[in-house]
Image: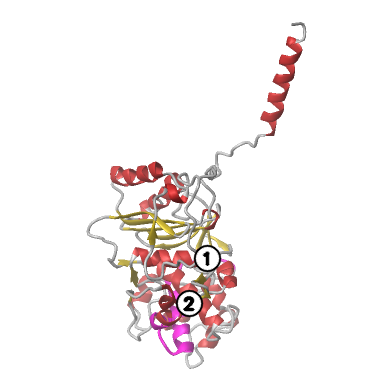
Amino acid sequence: MKNKPYRCFLVFLLVMIVASCMPMESKNTLLLPEIEETPTTVIDAAYWPTDSWRESTPIEQGMDAITLQKMLEEIDKEGLNIDSLIVVRNGYIVTEKYYPPYEQDTLHEAYSVTKSILSALVGIAIKNGYINSVNDPVLEYFPKRSFNNEDALKRSVTIKHLLTMTAGLEFDWDEMIWSQDWVQYVLDQPMYAKPGTEFLYSSGNGHVLSAIIQNTSGQNAHSFAQQYLFNDLGIENVRWQKDIFGISKGGWGMSMTPRDMAKIGYLYLNQGIWAGKQVVSAEWIEDSTKRYVQVPDPLEPWDLYLGYLWWLHEDGLFAAHGMKGQFIYVIPDFDLVVVITSNIPDAEFSQPQLLIRDFILPAVKSAAE
């Protein structure tokens, strides 16, 4: 018994050494879920949700059904004005909920989610040779027009500056809407900053990009999207408003079903590949989801950055955002796509996103396939 104190000391010392090697958690960092090795259904390599999505139970795809059910209960309890919610894991819909009057096939106004889809069309236009490069000066695509306040600074505005909302052009939403020619209005505006240096949210940027697609391809962005994007994904029912000149509204105006919105997210999750075809180049998606500018005073409760009309958070998530709470979230680390449509005011814009942080991510219990 005389060695018992010594043995106790060794045990105590071992415990302290192990404890000192454990990482400390930061209160300001999003805690990612602990991954367990839970058996998941292996997805058929030939399956793509072109014709229809496959459905699965959460547990079969490594997610906790109780946590996801609590999320739906939270929506009801808090009276969140959510219209639909879809969670896709490993290519399967594991949670899907619609709130009256919305149903699975109901078209929903996407608002500025339109911008992110337009971004994909710009990448496709470059891939197919309609647009040369993101570094092309914008004014060169309107050779028959003349613009007010034209100077060397305005002539240096590029397609990339429009995509990242750093064009440096002044913009007023109401003035654009009441003007007859939206493209002319946007490009007539004076410069307030050197291009590439300051963020200014402008739906006019997207409309100019839509006009460039129409000028170069000979068809408006809606027809272009149907030919080069929607047909491959099996998206058939889309409404897209136009201006008085027949230009598809580049900053908003698209309506589609939540399941079709999920297809856009799934395309980006798979680096632009759909059913073996490279619909959008992987390089374009990589470039689109880089941080180019930090967004000042975001509505979100965390840092926000802008890529090519896709929004990036500091925790590796990227998303398409639309007014009144329309979202396509892509979370590559967990093979997740989340679509939320809503009718909420700006003051509550973060509510749908908190569902992802507080319920959907914590529900992940096994590694992605």
Asked if 91 appears above or below 127 in the picture, the reply is above
Q: Could you say whether the residue bearing mark 2 is in a helix, strand or loop?
A: helix
Crowding at dot 2, Cα within 10 Å, few <14 / some 14-19 / many 20+, comes out as: many
Determine which quarter of the picture holds residue 31.
Answer: top right
Residue at coordinates 55% horizontally, 64% vertically from top-left? 289
Residue at the outermost left position:
101
Residue at coordinates 69% horizontally, 29% vertically from top-left? 18
Q: Nearer the viewer, residue 278 or 280?
A: 278
Whole-angstrom CA distance, mark 1 to mark 2, is 17 Å
Image x and y of residue 301, in percent: 47, 49
Q: Is residue 296 left or right of residue 65?
A: right
**Magenta stretch: includes residue 17:** no
Scheme by which the image is coloured: secondary structure
Q: Is residue 37 visible?
A: yes
Kind of residue sitting beneath label 1: Asn
Q: Nearer the viewer, residue 21 or 203?
A: 21
Q: Is residue 194 visible?
A: no
Q: Residue 44 has which mark?
A: none
Stretch in magenta: 197-224
The reply to whether dot 1 and dot 2 touch (C-beta < 8 Å) is no
Determine which quarter of the picture holds residue 158.
Answer: bottom right
- Give the quarter of the figure containing the N terminus: top right
Asked if 41 appears above or below 47 in the picture, the reply is above
Disc 1 target residue: 270
Disc 2 target residue: 121
Kind of residue sitting beneath label 2: Leu
Image x and y of residue 157, in percent: 56, 78
**Magenta stretch: includes residue 208:** yes
Q: Could you say whether the residue bearing mark 1 is in a helix, strand or loop?
A: loop
